[in-house]
Image (cartoon, rainbow, N blue to C red):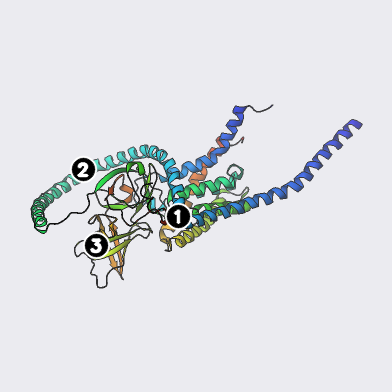
Amino acid sequence: MVRWFHYLEQQTRVKNSTRTVNRIAAPVKSVAQRFAYLLLILGAVGVLVIGRVDVASMEQVRSQIVDAVAPILDMAGRPVESFNVGVERLREILTVHDENQRLRQQRDRLLHWQSAARKLETENRALKGLLNFSAGPETSFIAARVVADPGGAFAHSLILNAGERAGVRKGQAAVTGDGLVGRISGVGRRSSRLLLITDLNSRIPIAIESNRTRAVLAGANTGRPRLIHLPTGAVIAKGDRVVTSGHGGVFPAGLPIGVVSSVAYGIIDVQPYVNRERVEYVRVLDYGLKGIIRSGPDRSGSGERR
Amino acid sequence: MKPTIWHRMDILSRQLTPFVLTILLVLLSAVPFQIPGLARIMPLFSLIAIFHWGVNRSELLPVYAVFAIGFFQDALSGVPMGVHTVVFVMVYSLVLAQHRFFLGKSFYVVWLGFALVSAGAFVLLWMLVSAFNAAAVDPWSVFSQYLLGVGCYPVVAHLFLRWQRAFLQQV
């Protein structure tokens, strides 16, 4: 009996002592936890500030992270791609008759254009010879696959599976058969980020094809970028074709971008030819010009060779 | 009995799954699905995951893991670095502060909680990204992305709950 009491007493003492420890430890732990949260929030704000002050090094961190996951994304995309191919094939089978008719009509139209183009080409060559015209730099290209579309409303960009090793450089233009997709905004060793023309940060010098009116195409994170900095008295109508003007030496001139889709109250929207969701492969154009985009003021000179 | 090394490794790998699953979800949402108009309003799955694990098993997704997820989301999505990091850590702290409220509540209440917290998170994201770009991000796309995220919450949460029942019961 006595032993039993003794045991109970011991147990209670142990319990009490752990309780005392808990009583002291719990608030300390909670304070430490709160401190950790505060520290991490401050750390995150610190990341924001560093990203603002030292753009180049933060972008390097970013491209290293993307570089690391690009092969995973590449692999993850393969089954999805074959699924997409299957869906596309099914759609093609369903519309094969209409498609055939449409293609016949298009062929007739194109044959007409072909003869016109041949005539113009000969004429153009002859006129260039007369004027002693010097052609612009030769454009070579790098083919790249789109491995990721991070999506979201806050940034419009794609990730490509070609990087510095393949010769991709910041500022180069990326096109598909339909037209301009965007420009390279960040380059890693084996991946790069392609800033779409619809992104809020995209500004592209353009010209209206028919009357050579110049303006800047500004993305707004919507499906349709806008024309800004138009000259006074510019006449622009719905349906006008928009092409790159080649100003600034970043893009070759004459790359098709889209058509003017609406002109209302001085706001001119452009419907791009390229549909973001349908882009699988792009050609990154190496225009040969250095362009106006550098890696950062502190790395001028070394930026291109890195 | 002292647990064997394999047993400990098993537990550790199970404990890591909330973080790994969230990262995989971020990667999966970046795979280009060729569905017209989807990419622009792709739901922010990482926010769903952070909210879910914060409410259900916060000890398996500690705050520094949330920080890492935010940093990764920033790197991948192309917004200024730190934007998602700030918002995710704040959301997580808020969820943990309200942990008692969510305890034992029905799924609909938790869903409503997510709708509210997520609305706050998107307003904050919108403000930060707009401030950094010195131009307002199109609010309509942001709102669509938010709505789609709230709509996707039950699906993702359901999958996570099944995972919890299958693999994390003993951990």
Earlier residue among tags 1 and 3: 1
Dot label at residue A207: 3
Q: Quadrant of the N terminus of chain B?
A: top right
Q: Quadrant of the C terminus of chain B?
A: top right
Residue positioned most to the front:
A301
Q: Secondary structure at mark 2?
A: helix
Residue located beneath label 1 in the image: A55
In the rendered image, the vertical position of residue A97 relative to residue B82, given as above or below = above
Q: Pinpoint the chain carrying mark 1.
A: A
Q: Amino acid type of disc 3? A: Ala
Q: How far, Cα to Cα, is label 1 from label 3?
A: 31 Å
Q: Is residue B20 visible?
A: yes
**Residue A37 rendering spot, x and y as whole percentages:** 61, 52
Residue located beneath label 2 in the image: A96
Q: Amino acid type of disc 2? A: Val
**Residue A49 rendering spot, x and y as whole percentages:** 51, 57
